[in-house]
Image (tube, rainbow, N blue to C red):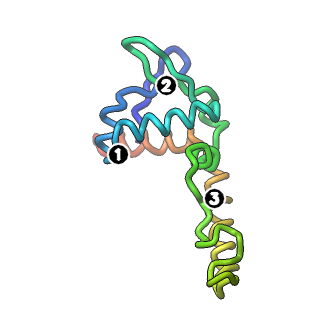
Amino acid sequence: EIPLRLVGSEMCIRDRDMISQRQNISLSYLEQLFAKLRKASLVKSVRGPGGGYLLNVNAVDVTLTQIIEAVDENIDLRRCHGSKDCLRGKQCLSHHLWCEVSDQIRGFLSTRNLQQVIDDYKINQDIQLH
């Protein structure tokens, strides 16, 4: 959940305090996440009293997989993370199952872009208001 506001033709992410409270994460951790997103060139920072972060790409051009990987989150559900040593140095019985599940999740998230998430959020907000 990120409050977005159109600034000219760009979306600006503001109110980091509200985001950290609603997501139950510290402001310093949230800033670390934004730093990683900036390093991945997904956002750019805007200084000043009305500052925040601007998307550095079109929302339709960035997949959820790109965002997750930019903040160093892991989509791989395997305990061994692919090294095939999950059971005392050997491959566990369910290794291939978790490979398939991880691939399915990665595939799904690769088909969803940030604009779709924003649109879904707006639709849900409209439904809740009525």
The total of numbered circles placed on residues is 3
Residue at coordinates 31% horizontally, 47% vertically from top-left?
Answer: 24
Q: Quadrant of residue 43?
A: top right
Q: Amino acid at mark 1?
A: Ile
Instruction: Look at the image and tell me in which quarter the N terminus lies.
Output: top left
Point out the tag, 2 or 1, that comes first from the N-terminus: 1
Q: Are marks 3 and 2 in contact (CB under 8 Å)?
A: no
Q: Amino acid at mark 2?
A: Tyr
What whole-number distance in Å separates the C-alpha atoms at marks 3 and 2? 27 Å
What whole-number distance in Å separates the C-alpha atoms at marks 2 and 1? 18 Å
Question: Which residue was labeled with disc 2?
Answer: 53
Question: Which residue was labeled with disc 3?
Answer: 108
The residue closer to the viewer here, 130 or 78, is: 78
Residue at coordinates 40% horizontally, 33% vertically from top-left?
Answer: 3
Q: Amino acid at mark 3?
A: Phe
Point out the tag, 3 or 1, that comes first from the N-terminus: 1
Question: Which residue was labeled with disc 1?
Answer: 25
Instruction: Look at the image and tell me in which quarter the C terminus lies.
Output: top left
Residue at coordinates 64% horizontally, 35% vertically from top-left?
Answer: 40
